[in-house]
Amino acid sequence: MQLNQIIEHIDQAFGEELPFSTRELDGQDREVLHRVFGDQGYQSYLQDQVNRQIIRDYLTNAVLLGFVAEQRLLGFGRQLASREERAALSLHMLMSSVEQAGELLEEDHAQSLKILNPLPGAPPYMKLIKG
């Protein structure tokens, strides 16, 4: 199955999206929204916000469930300081259970990710590898 087909299937299962605004938007409103939200800067901002939320939820669950002591959260400080580190950490958190939260403290996630170069003609796939 193709990745885009998987995503399309999931998106269809979500159903109708909620409206962006409760009031009717005129042409000028749409122009401003397109100018603000339609560029790469907003997409980067939005992805970083998603990464922050994943990290926040994961670490909160890990502390509440007793897999990481609250004082050990300070150990994540360096990993949370940059956009790249947050992206790598949130990816690892999505791929890990909260039981593994303590292990995430010791790893350097940005350095452990490598760009994959598939062979020409290889089927599309995603695989997370450690370096």
Image: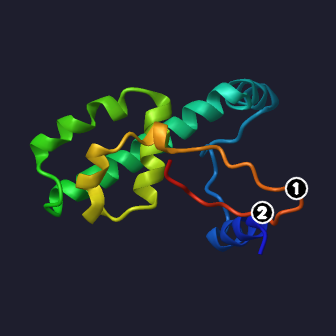
Query: Which percent across, then down, holds residue 48?
Result: 51, 36
User: CA gap, disc 1 to disc 2?
Assistant: 10 Å
8 shown above or below 79:
below
Local crowd at mark 1 within 10 Å, few (<14), some, or many (≥20)? few
Mark carried by residue 120 = 1
Look at 27% across and 31% down and name the residue there: 77
Q: Is residue 1 left or right of residue 130?
A: right
Look at 63% across and 30% down and name the residue there: 42
Amino acid at circle 2 = Pro
Task: Provide the residue designation for mark 2.
Answer: 124
Under circle 2, the secondary element is loop
Amino acid at circle 1 = Pro
**Quadrant housing the N terminus:** bottom right
Question: Which of the 4 image quarters holds residue 14?
Answer: bottom right
Who is closer to the viewer here, 12 or 70?
70
79 shown above or below 102:
above
